[in-house]
C-alpha cells in the first residue's frame, strides 16, 4: 500500500500548490501540478477500496489528530517547566561590544539590552545594543522605551535575533547587589520567564581578569519578594539566607567556525599578550584601597541595620511585659467580678494600644549588604593572593 505525499499534503493546513501567472495578470494552477494531484487522488481512491488500506488511513488520521491537539505552545511550556537554566552561551562579538561600551563611559555606569534565544537549558546571547545615558525623568524614560522598541524593530527588519533575554550593566568594584537590581529583575520577569543580567566590572578587568558574570534571581527569593514579607519567621520557613538571593550561571563563550579560523590567523606568534603583562603589575594599591573603603562603608550600613533590629526587639520585649501586666490585672479583676456574680471581662482588648503588633523591619537590606560584604572580601582575598605571588616571584628573580 502506498499513500502519496501530495494527497496527504492537501489534507493539512498551510500546504501550497505551484502557481503560475498568465499574461493577463491572472494566477492559475500549474497544469502539471494539477495532473499530479489528479493521479494522487485516483491512487488514493483505488487503495481506499482495500479494507486494510482504510484501516491504515484511519489510524494515521487519528495519530495526526492527537498530535495536532497538543500545540507547540503546550510542548514548549512543558519543556520550560522541566528544564532549568544551566548555561549562558554568549558570542564573542557580544562580549567585545559589552566591554567596549562599559570601558568608554567608565567610571559612569551604563546598561544595554541582551538579545538571543532561549533553547532548553541554554540561554543563547547572540546580539546586544547599548542604552543611551540620560537623566531620570518620566518623559525621558518614555523616550528610552521607544528607543528600545525602535532598535528591536530595526534588528527584526535586517533578520537579526530581536528576542530579549536580559540586559547587561557595568559596575564599580563589584558594587552591584542593590534593591534597584532586584526591581529590574522583577520587571523583566513579568514578561520574560527566564532572563539574566550580565555584570561587567572594568576596574577588576584592569587587573588582568575578565570580570564578567551572569546572574539571575533564585525562584524561592522571587516568590518571597512578591509577597513582600522578609520577616525572620518567613525566612526560616522558606529556609532562605543571604547567599540564596542571586544565582550565578556559568558563561560559555561561543564563536562561529569562520570567526575561530580568522582569530587563528590573527593570533601572534609569541604566546605572551598584553593581558599577561597586566597580571605582573606590582601596583594594586588603588584597587585594594577602594575595596577596603567600600567594605568599611558596608560594615557601617550593616551596623545601622542591626541597630534597627535591636530597637525593634527592645520595643517588642517592652510590649510583651506591658501585655503580661495588663493580663494579670484583668485576671484579678475577673476573679473579683466572678465572686460578685458578674460576668468576666475579655482578657484581650483590641482597642488597647499595647495589643497592636509592632511591624518587624525588613531583612532584605541587611541581606544585600551582607552579600556585598562577602563580594568585597572575596575580591580583597583574590587581589592579596595574587599580589603575594607576584612579590615572591620578583624576590626570586632578584635573588637569581
Image (cartoon, rainbow, N blue to C red):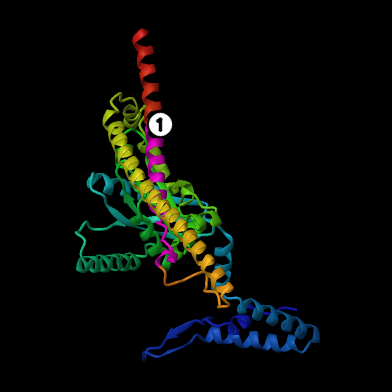
Residue 285 in the magenta stretch? The answer is: no
Percent across and percent down for residue 24 are 36, 91
* Label 1 environment density (alpha carbons within 10 Å; few <14, some 14–19, many ≥20): few
Start-end of magenta stretch: 353-380
Q: Is residue 256 above or below residue 83?
A: above
Q: Residue furthest top?
A: 400
The structure residue drawn at horizontal position 75% and vertical position 81%, both measured from the top left corner, is: 56
The structure residue drawn at horizontal position 26% and vertical position 31%, both measured from the top left corner, is: 286
Q: Quadrant of the C terminus?
A: top left
The answer to which image quadrant residue 55 occupies is bottom right
Q: According to the image, label 1 marks what residue?
A: 381
Q: Residue furthest front?
A: 340
Percent across and percent down for residue 341 are 58, 77
Element marked by disc 1: helix
> Is residue 342 toward the left or the right of residue 115 in the image?
right
Numbered marks: total: 1
Q: Is residue 290 above or below residue 386?
A: below
Residue 51 in sight in this render: yes
Residue 206 in sight in this render: no
State whether the magenta stretch is mostly helix, strand or loop. Answer: helix
Q: Quadrant of the N terminus?
A: bottom right
The answer to which image quadrant residue 70 occupies is bottom right
Which residue is nearer to you in this view: 231 or 211?
A: 231
Which residue is nearer to you in this view: 251 or 56?
A: 251
Amino acid at each position: 500500500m502506498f499513500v502519496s505525499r501530495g494527497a496527504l499534503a492537501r489534507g493539512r493546513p498551510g500546504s501550497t500548490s505551484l502557481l503560475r501567472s498568465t499574461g493577463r495578470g491572472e494566477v492559475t494552477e500549474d497544469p502539471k501540478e494539477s495532473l499530479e494531484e489528479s493521479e494522487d487522488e485516483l491512487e488514493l481512491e483505488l487503495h481506499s477500496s482495500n479494507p486494510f488500506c482504510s484501516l491504515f488511513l484511519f489510524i494515521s488520521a487519528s495519530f495526526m489528530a492527537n498530535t495536532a491537539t497538543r500545540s507547540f505552545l503546550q510542548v514548549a511550556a512543558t519543556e520550560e517547566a522541566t528544564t532549568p537554566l544551566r548555561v549562558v552561551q554568549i558570542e564573542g562579538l557580544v562580549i567585545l561590544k559589552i566591554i567596549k561600551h562599559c570601558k568608554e563611559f567608565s567610571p559612569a555606569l551604563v546598561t544595554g539590552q541582551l538579545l538571543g534565544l532561549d533553547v532548553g537549558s541554554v540561554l543563547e546571547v547572540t546580539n546586544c545594543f547599548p542604552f543611551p545615558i540620560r537623566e531620570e525623568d518620566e518623559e525621558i524614560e518614555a523616550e528610552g522605551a521607544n528607543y528600545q522598541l525602535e532598535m528591536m524593530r530595526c534588528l527584526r527588519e535586517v533578520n537579526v535575533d530581536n528576542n530579549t533575554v536580559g540586559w547587561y550593566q557595568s559596575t564599580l568594584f563589584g558594587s552591584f547587589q542593590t534593591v534597584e537590581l532586584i526591581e529590574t529583575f522583577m520587571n523583566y520577569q513579568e514578561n520574560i520567564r527566564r532572563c539574566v543580567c550580565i555584570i561587567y566590572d572594568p576596574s577588576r578587568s584592569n587587573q588582568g581578569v575578565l570580570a564578567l558574570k551572569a546572574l539571575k534571581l533564585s525562584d524561592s527569593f522571587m516568590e518571597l519578594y512578591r509577597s513582600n514579607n522578609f520577616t525572620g519567621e518567613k525566612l526560616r520557613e522558606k529556609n532562605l539566607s543571604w547567599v540564596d538571593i542571586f544565582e550565578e550561571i556559568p558563561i560559555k563563550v561561543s564563536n562561529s567556525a569562520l570567526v575561530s579560523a580568522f582569530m587563528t590567523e590573527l593570533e601572534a606568534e609569541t604566546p605572551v599578550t598584553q593581558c599577561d603583562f597586566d597580571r605582573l603589575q606590582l601596583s594594586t594599591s588603588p584597587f585594594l584601597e577602594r575595596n577596603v573603603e567600600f567594605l568599611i562603608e558596608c560594615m557601617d550600613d550593616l551596623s545601622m541595620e542591626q541597630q534597627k533590629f535591636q530597637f525593634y526587639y527592645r520595643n517588642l520585649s517592652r510590649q510583651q511585659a506591658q501585655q503580661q501586666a495588663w493580663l494579670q490585672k484583668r485576671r484579678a479583676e475577673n476573679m473579683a467580678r466572678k465572686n460578685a456574680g458578674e460576668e468576666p471581662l475579655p482578657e484581650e482588648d483590641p482597642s488597647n494600644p499595647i495589643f497592636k503588633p509592632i511591624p518587624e523591619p525588613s531583612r532584605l537590606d541587611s541581606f544585600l549588604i551582607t552579600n556585598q560584604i562577602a563580594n568585597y572580601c572575596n575580591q580583597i582575598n583574590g587581589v592579596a593572593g595574587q599580589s603575594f605571588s607576584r612579590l615572591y616571584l620578583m624576590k626570586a628573580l632578584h635573588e637569581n
